[in-house]
Amino acid sequence: MNDIYLSIIVPVYNTEKYLNRCVDSIVNQTYKNLEIILVDDGSLDNCGKMCDEYAEKDSRIKVIHKQNGGLSDARNVGTSVAKGKYLTYIDSDDFVTKDYCEFLYNNIKKSEADISICKHYIMFEDGSKINTGTSKKYLMNKEEAFMKLLYSDDLDVSAWAKLYKRDIMENIFFPKDRLYEDSATTYKLIDKCKRIVFESEPKYIYAVRKNSITTNCFNKKKMDLILSTNEMCDYIEKEFPKLNEACARRKMYAYLSTLGQFATCETKEEDQKYLKIMWDYVQENRRDVLKDKKIPRRDKYALYISFMGFEFFKLSWRILKKIRNGKI
């Protein structure tokens, strides 16, 4: 067997409803030279048993059972034992097309890149999908990649839908006990790259779940998105001062996205202080951000709506969410 191969790391926690779909999509990849690492993060359902059953049927599968430590810890543990020259992460409630690995691997080899990136489908619980792909393909240096990341121009911070050269993972860890851990990690990996290749065909299927921790109501842990975004932008602004304007946009995006968590639920008394922090930030910085002609339309619309007051902002956010979910 060829000694150049991929390690796929799958953190698993209480996703028995989706696990077969995920693992089946991996074991049936057109690229066969795989190491598949299933990290059972202390699941309370049947996931641990299901993982072991898969390992009995496929010698490429390695199962790690550990105490619950969260998504970041599971990814870190999987990464620490991976033997592949290239790594990719797949969440256990998501799945991939049969040529996901082959597609990313071919691009990273042909371009001699450090990261290979594809686009994804967004799939809702009713089975409907949104295709985020276009017809673009390009090779970037890290400054160009940062620019696209900061403007959400094809690139995003998600750990998945990417293939990484193993070397750049050295001494990079996903932060434990933090939500939006990808926002605190992906920029560090990009910073270690000479080349990043992107092709916009969707090969990853991101499943939106109603009770996902990143889609339900606000709690103070949701402020982690702002914390991670500020850390990322502080670093990028220092290394690439020309990207200051792009960082201002990205920070505003983090505040607007977190504010949106208040739109679908009643605001708890203890959360009022966080609401005030975010709304004050939007009011103080929106005029400067609106001067940037490169900001995405969704940001522009949200900022214009914010001039109408928070209650109108909440109503508009609810309507937009229903439209995106196909309910209007």
Image (cartoon, grey):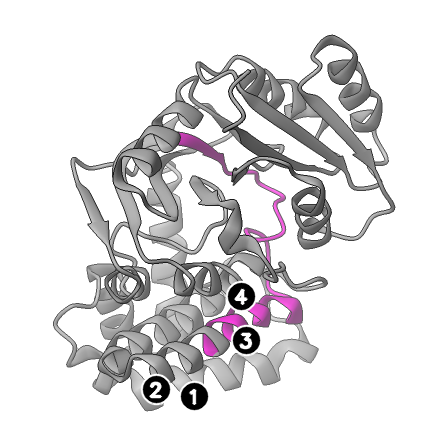
Q: Earlier in the sequence, mark 2 or mark 3?
A: 3
Foreground residue among 288 and 313 = 288
Residue linked to disc 1: 280
Q: Position of residue 233 (x, y in %)?
A: 40, 77
Question: Is residue 269 highlighted in magenta?
Answer: no
Q: Which mark is residue 184?
A: 4
Mark 3 surroundings: few (<14), some (14-19) or many (≥20) residues within 10 A:
some
Q: Amino acid at mark 1?
A: Asp
Left/right of residue 203 with respect to residue 216 in the rendered view = left
Residue linked to disc 2: 283
Q: Earlier in the sequence, mark 3 or mark 1?
A: 3
Q: Is residue 42 above or below residue 313?
A: above
Q: Position of residue 157 (x, y in %)?
A: 43, 56
The residue located at (55%, 15%) in the rendering is 1
Left/right of residue 65 with respect to residue 187 in the rendered view = right
Pointers 4 and 2 in contact (CB under 8 A)? no
Left/right of residue 160 with respect to residue 135 in the rendered view = right
SS at circle 3: helix
Q: Amino acid at mark 3?
A: Leu
Q: CA distance from mark 2 to mark 3?
A: 19 Å
Residue linked to disc 3: 227
Pointers 4 and 3 in contact (CB under 8 A)? yes
The residue located at (36%, 75%) in the rendering is 252
Q: Is residue 245 above or below residue 102?
A: below
Q: CA distance from mark 1 to mark 2?
A: 5 Å
Q: Amino acid at mark 2?
A: Gln
Pointers 1 and 2 in contact (CB under 8 A)? yes
SS at circle 2: helix
Magenta-drawn segment: 203-230
The residue located at (63%, 60%) in the rendering is 173
Q: Earlier in the sequence, mark 4 or mark 2?
A: 4
Q: Is residue 192 above or below residue 116?
A: below
